[in-house]
Amino acid sequence: MLKYIIKRLLYMIPTLFGISMIAFMIIQLPPGDYLTSLIARMSENGENVDPAQIAQLRAVYGFDDPIWIQYGKWISGILFRGDFGYSFDWNRPVSELIWERMGSTLAISVAALLFVWAVALPIGIFSAMRRHSVGDHVATLFGFIGLAIPNFILALTLMYVSYKYLGQNVGGLQSQEFIDAAWSMPKFLDLLAHLWIPVIVIGTSGTAALIRILRANLTDELNKPYVVTAKAKGLPEYKVVLKYPLRIALNPFVSAIGWVLPELISGVTITAIVLNLPTAGPLLLRALVSQDMYLAGSFILLMGALTLVGMLISDILLALLDPRIRFN
């Protein structure tokens, strides 16, 4: 397995270079640039645009340079100085904007992932072992409801319930008095009081999908000859299910890591906007709209890197979970 991991890590290097070039090309595809968007916004607000100042800014930021020169400056700064560029829209280094948003993004995403696994795993096992029972039909009903309801509708509903019946301030991850306060137990409890809404909203659709997937996979495994033989020899049902069929049926849970990591950045953007969450998704959306190319390109590059890391972790865990998988 060590040889396989080293080989994958070496393959990731040219892949990341390809992703960085594609990311930079994507953010350059729309006509104009950040200064074009800035001029349009200033004109809409009735502000005067100084052509000399705009020309000076274009020269300073290198907007008139060929695209390969702009890319070379950006990627060399990342490789040799850890510099992801400068955000024109925020007037701050891109690295500062990324890392200050990743803490809250990571907290919400990990909590939502744990919620999905904690709910989907027992319900999926029960539904597979007690097919067509009342409990199975109830789980199926709630699963379809979770898939059908848009996240932002569920977010608005929970915000109303929280404000109307629980008397809780909604929106964001902290109450106003704790935003700039140092970390303490009251601040942590306040975070937990705000965290449950985004966790339920983000985790609902994923929970519903994984319940159906686990039920289908485990049902298929329970009908195979080795399971029937084990039951015929008198092994307890829970031992038969947990020993091998469940391990094989858990493959979708492990495979989900490959797309969970990039979801830390790009996922649930609409939900984050509705709930006023300080996560990376709204920041990426704003960067794309304003054509803040270094901020948008850095986010896209980070998403690609997280996808590769997630797929590597998924492959390793699948090999440990399923003995039928072997690496060359």
Image (cartoon, rainbow, N blue to C red):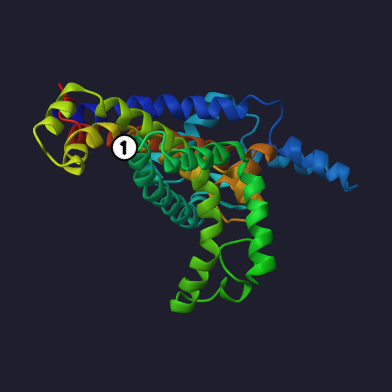
Residue 2 in view: no
Outermost residue toward the left in this view:
233
- How packed is label 1: few (under 14 Cα within 10 Å), some, or many (20 or more)? some
Residue at numbered disc 1: 129
Count how many numbered circles sit on residues in the image. Answer: 1
Quarter of the picture containing the N terminus is top left
Q: Position of residue 147 (x, y in %)?
A: 55, 37
Q: Residue at x 91, y 47 (%)?
A: 46
Residue 307, position in %: x, y?
40, 34
In the image: residue 53, left or right of residue 98: right
Does residue 79 appear anywhere in the picture? yes
* Residue at image coords 61%, 27%: 28
In the displayed structure, does residue 281 sit left or right of residue 34?
A: left
199 sits to left or right of 258 = right
Q: Residue at the spot x=50%, y=24% of the render?
A: 22
Place residue 174 in its image quadrant. Answer: bottom right
5, 202: nearer the viewer: 202
In the rendered image, which quarter contains the C terminus?
A: top left
Which three-letter amino acid code belongs to the residue tagged 1? Met
Q: Position of residue 255 (x, y in %)?
A: 34, 33
Q: Is residue 274 above or below residue 307?
A: below
Residue 239 vs residue 326, the one in the foreground: 239
Q: Is residue 133 left or right of residue 33?
A: left
The residue shown at (60%, 71%) is 175
- In this orientation, which residue lies closer to the viewer: 300 or 201? 201
Which element carries disc 1, helix, strand or loop?
helix
Q: Position of residue 47 (x, y in %)?
A: 88, 48
Task: Quadrant for residue 55, please give it.
Answer: top right
